[in-house]
């Protein structure tokens, strides 16, 4: 399988609107971060993980081929606001979206025009599938195990795909969930910034400790602010086997 990091930034992206810090003015493309999303591909299956407001820009450089599923982690704007932009993919059929119950409810509220009895021409054709933690899915040739993590008080989904685990926006995880991450070799997890605790996101030190507990061979951090610093310099501060992902990075799993 192949994972492409379409975006690695937090809800405001990097550069941050109105900021003139050195990172936001950097000319290194690795310091420019769109909202966090990823594309997981096998030889026959393509899965989009989250679909934020930058998704059109993120998908334009890639081959235009069928999406076999869209896996959502939660209902927050920076993870779902681009769903309407997927409408061109409807030439391949309905867009299958997989999410927990609260996210499915939220989509029906925020995009009611997609779920009326009589749809006006041109709306994206969305087929919602409610999934639950630990209920295994099989989409194409990819096996998927949803797990539950906590985004402050909000239960959201992370996903395991064989030896790969993808988690974003996590603050904590219940002890019972760790067994579903045994044997993970490649971990993707959020790391907001170095300092100043946040009520719903892990900081870099928290993410490092979490990665060490999982014991993955390699870890990639996502959902970062400009306060991470310059990509090249920040990476040198991480333990071996851990690095900050950047937009456009592709890894083989």
Image: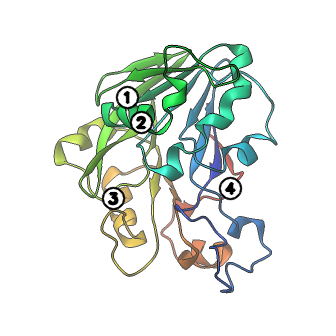
**Left or right, 147 with reference to 55:** left
Q: Are marks 1 and 2 in contact (CB under 8 Å)?
A: no
Residue assigned mark 2:
109
- From this view, report whether residue 179 is shown above or below residue 66: below
Question: In the rendered structure, which disc, 4 or 2, sits on the residue that comes first in sequence?
Answer: 2
Q: Are marks 3 and 1 in contact (CB under 8 Å)?
A: no
- From this view, report whether residue 193 is shown above or below residue 37: below
Question: In the rendered structure, which disc, 4 or 3, sits on the residue that comes first in sequence?
Answer: 3
**Left or right, 98 with reference to 136:** right
Residue 7: which numbered mark, if any? Answer: none
Tell me which residue sits at (64%, 69%) in the image: 14
From where the camera sits, is residue 253 visible? no
Q: Position of residue 31 (x, y in %)?
A: 69, 70
Residue assigned mark 3:
210
Q: Position of residue 40 (x, y in %)?
A: 60, 34
Question: In the rendered structure, which disc, 2 or 3, sits on the residue that comes first in sequence?
Answer: 2
Residue assigned mark 1:
145
Residue 247: which numbered mark, if any? Answer: 4
In which quadrant of the rendered image does the C terminus lie? top right
Indicate which label's residue lies in the foreground, 4 or 2. Answer: 2
Question: In the rendered structure, which disc, 4 or 1, sits on the residue that comes first in sequence?
Answer: 1
**Left or right, 245 with reference to 97:** right
Considering depth in this image, is 235 or 169 the residue closer to the camera? Answer: 169
The residue carrying pointer 4 sits among few (fewer than 14), some (14 to 19) or many (20 or more) residues within 10 Å by Cα, namely many
Considering depth in this image, is 245 or 48 the residue closer to the camera? Answer: 48
Question: In the rendered structure, which disc, 1 or 2, sits on the residue that comes first in sequence?
Answer: 2
Tell me which residue sits at (82%, 42%) in the image: 61
């Amino acid at each position: 399988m192949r994972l492409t990091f379409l975006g690695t930034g937090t809800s405001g992206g990097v550069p941050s609107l109105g900021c003139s810090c050195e990172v936001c003015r950097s000319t290194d493309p690795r310091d420019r971060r769109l909202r966090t999303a990823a594309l997981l591909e096998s030889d026959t299956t393509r899965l989009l993980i989250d679909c934020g407001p930058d998704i059109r820009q993120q998908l334009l450089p890639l081959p235009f081929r069928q999406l076999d599923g869209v896996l959502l982690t939660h209902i927050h704007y920076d993870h779902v606001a681009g769903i309407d932009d997927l409408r061109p993919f409807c030439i391949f059929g309905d867009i299958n979206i997989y999410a927990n119950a609260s996210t499915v409810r939220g989509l029906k509220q925020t995009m009611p025009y997609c779920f009326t009895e009589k749809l006006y021409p041109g709306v994206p054709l969305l087929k919602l599938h409610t999934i639950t933690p630990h209920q295994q899915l099989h989409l194409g040739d990819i096996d998927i195990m949803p797990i539950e993590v906590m985004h402050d008080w909000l239960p959201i989904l992370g996903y395991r795909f064989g030896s790969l685990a993808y988690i974003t926006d996590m603050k904590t995880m219940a002890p019972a969930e760790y067994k579903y991450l045994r044997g993970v070799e490649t971990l993707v997890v959020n790391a907001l910034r170095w300092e100043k605790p946040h009520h719903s996101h892990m900081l870099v030190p928290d993410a490092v400790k979490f990665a060490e507990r999982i014991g993955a061979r390699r870890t990639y951090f996502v959902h970062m602010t400009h306060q991470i610093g310059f990509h090249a310099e920040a990476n040198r501060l991480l333990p071996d086997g851990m690095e900050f992902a950047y937009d456009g990075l592709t890894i083989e799993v």
